[in-house]
Image (cartoon, rainbow, N blue to C red):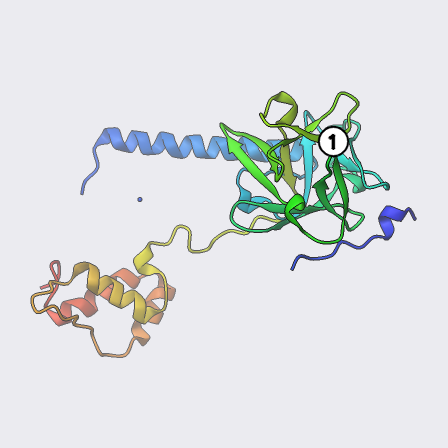
Amino acid sequence: MSEYDKVRIGKLVLKGEKPKSKKRKHKKQHNKDKAESVQDEDSILHGGWWKATSIAEITGTVAIEFGNSCYVKALDNGLFTLGAPHDEKEGPSPEEILTAFPVNDTKIALKSGYGKYIGVDKKGVVIGRSDAVGAMEQWEPIFEDGKLALLSNTGCFMSVADDDDITCERTKAGPSEILTIRSLTQKIQDSSKNVPTEEQGSLAEVEINYVRKFQKFQDKKLRINVESRAELEQAKNEGNLHEALLDRRSKMKADRYCK
């Protein structure tokens, strides 16, 4: 077992729709599905490692890719180099696997497999020798036009030198500074992402939200049906929540659409 394998990675603490608009919507969905298909194919070609497209996705098990299937590799002396190219459907090697932690809304920290945080020394060399996250161990992912570069606290971007060493010396991101961060962390789907705002929360909150949306406020007072909401729970399970809410509002005789 190598020294690398012995190290255990720690943790850091949008009335009425015209035919044209329908076409546009259909085209937009088609483009979205196409983009997802391309992303899936790209992931397969990289052994299941998918491409991060936002800072929120840079967390957990990651690898930094320069070029095509070449990843930043940690050395046992705390330095980093560019690893050899990988074959299709092959992910990064153990020494090329890092762990990413969010520092704030715009910056992240990276830890090598040797348990050290990645930073930059005074000469602009990327090193991994720190046991804690300081200013020099913070990185800002810069996304622009589908490309990504990592900006250090020195104002320079991570790049690959002519000898394949990983450095941080240039204040402008050129071809040598463009990289890809790939993740093996399972994507978490937001269950409320496609749920309208007025339908989020408890059934009591949902009913209040709908009353606010449709009721005429002649006396500025909300009129809520005080009967048991057990029927709403059942309607929700059966997929008839809207109809049940309509029935309850119609009993109050105060809505725009209920008489």
Residue 30 lies, in percent from the top left, at 42, 31
Q: Nearer the viewer, residue 130 or 17?
A: 130
Q: Is residue 20 visible?
A: yes
- The correct choice, above or below, for 26 with respect to 243 in the image is above
Amino acid type at circle 1 is Ile
Residue 175 in the image, given as x and y percentages of width and height: 62, 21
Direction right: furthest residue: 1
Q: Residue at x 20, y 70 (%)?
A: 248
Q: Is residue 119 above or below residue 24?
A: below
> What residue is shown with label 1?
166
Q: Is residue 184 visible?
A: no
In the image: residue 135, left or right of residue 114: left
Q: Is residue 242 above or below residue 112?
A: below
Task: Give me the residue at 35% from left, 32% from top.
Answer: 26
Q: Quadrant of residue 177?
A: top right
Count how many numbered circles sit on residues in the image: 1
Q: Nearer the viewer, residue 222 or 130?
A: 130
Residue at the far front: name it: 122
Looking at the image, residue 220 lies above or below residue 48: below
The kind of secondary structure element at disc 1 is strand
Q: Quadrant of the C terminus?
A: bottom left
Density class for disc 1 (Cα within 10 Å; few <14, some 14-19, many ≥20) is: many
Spot occupied by residue 132 in the image (x, y as percentages of width and height) = 71, 54
Residue 217, quarter of the rendered image:
bottom left
Whole-percent x and y of residue 239?
A: 34, 60
Name the residue at 40% across, 35% down: 29
